[in-house]
Image: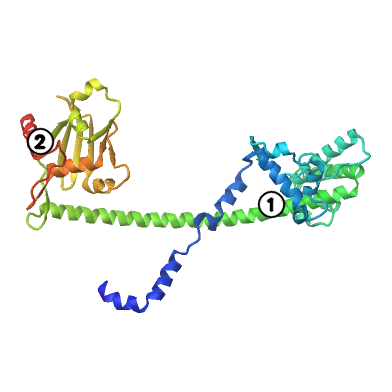
Amino acid sequence: MMPLEPFVKLHNEALKSFLNDLCDVNEFHEALQLEEYIALCRKEIRIDISVNEIALVHTLLLKYRENIVRTEGDEVVTYLRDLPEPTEEMSSNQTHVKMALLQHSRENLGMPAQSPRGVSLDVYDELATTKRQCRHLLKRLFRVTPHCLDRPSLQEALKQAEEVPLRDVPADARLASEHVATLQSLGGPSMVVELYAELRTTFQDRERLLQEAEFQLRSLRGVYETMIEHTDTLMEQLDAYREYLDAVRAKVGQSHTNSMYLFRKPRGSHRFTHTQLEKDGVIIETRGIPQSKRGSINYTLQCTGPGVFTIAISYKGQKAFLEKVVRLEDLLEIQHLQEPVIDLEHVVLNARRTLMVLSRLFMRRESMPARPISRHFNTATIQNKGATAKSLD
């Protein structure tokens, strides 16, 4: 980088600005609005809220009603008029409740927007039932014939739907006309007008949400394709890195003069007992092996190639029931983790202490005296283990 130093000093501010612009990237979730997309896909949303929080929201709605309410017929006005004001007992109640958030209005719940006056209870119930059935039928009809919603009135939209040559559509349109006539006779023409306006708004919002969902889907597909391309690139880089590492490891294994650390050729093996490795902190956890059988378990360490080691677990006088191949680069990477461990299914090894043992057994320095890896694994211990291994062989 030394030849570039004059250039960097000359364009220092421009380079700083360029790097800052590179780092100024919108959040992934914020750019794609994934939370909103997921929320739209959920059929029901439940929140955990306390009674005093409900009372606080109610109080704020009453206080700022003039700023919140858009029109006189707004549902917020109706709810605030029907609900009693929150009491002091509610404001101090910390009890938590589960509350479902539904995308429904009072009409969806079978309740009229305004309480009818001078109407008997039977007529009131008939009106609510007729309106609910009529809304359900009209929604099903207009899902098939959305172009009919362009007509100025509900009656004209139903007449146009009767002429649509689709199965069951004319019959549904005639049945809906009968419900609309009943609704008009019970609640007046204004109720039919409000219902039609509500349906048009609902379908317009649904079309808008559908367009937004399609846009989000295209964005997600683009991100997915980009991630796949990036993954392929990383895999290619990883393969190239592995090839380079294998070549370097083979070259180091063949060198005998210029390298400080030399891997020994594949020869011999070193055997340790379970008790010794556990005492020296190499084994930090044992799974599924009874305490009575741990004394008869041996661990054989062997270097099968430059930087490649095999750890075999066996009972005395029997064939190994588990073998694990460990690479030097993996150990060097694991030792910097917060919990550097090697999981051998039956036992868990401390990666740092395992690396120290393998380094002492299979690597040597040209001009530096050997250092003990712990108070248990000194030079004499290793030599004794090597002699034991030869005698066992």
Query: Which image quarter: residue 3?
Result: bottom left
- The answer to whether residue 164 is seen in the rendering is no
Measuring from the top left, give residue 220's x and y in whole percent.
52, 54
Q: Which mark is residue 381?
A: 2
Give the number of marks: 2
Asked if 263 appears above or below 318 in the picture, the reply is below
The type of residue carrying mark 1 is Arg
Q: Quadrant for the C terminus, please.
A: top left
Task: Report the residue marked by disc 1.
Answer: 206
Q: Earlier in the sequence, mark 2 or mark 1?
A: 1
Q: Residue at x 26, y 46 (%)?
A: 335
Q: Residue at x 8, y 51 (%)?
A: 368
SS state under label 2: helix
Asked if 390 appears above or below 192 in the picture, the reply is above
- The answer to whether residue 283 is seen in the rendering is yes
Disc nearest the viewer among 2 and 1 = 2
Instruction: Measure the alpha-carbon separation of dots 2 and 1.
Output: 77 Å
Q: Residue at x 69, y 44 (%)?
A: 56
SS state under label 1: helix
* For residue 110, side relative to residue 99 (left or right): right
Measuring from the top left, give residue 302's x and y in whole percent.
15, 39
* For residue 274, side relative to residue 100 (left or right): left
Measuring from the top left, give residue 178's x and y in whole percent.
87, 42
> From this viewpoint, which residue is outermost toward the right?
118
Query: Which image quarter: residue 171?
Result: top right
**Label 1: few (<14), some or many (≥20) within 10 Å?**
few
Measuring from the top left, give residue 13's x and y in whole percent.
40, 75
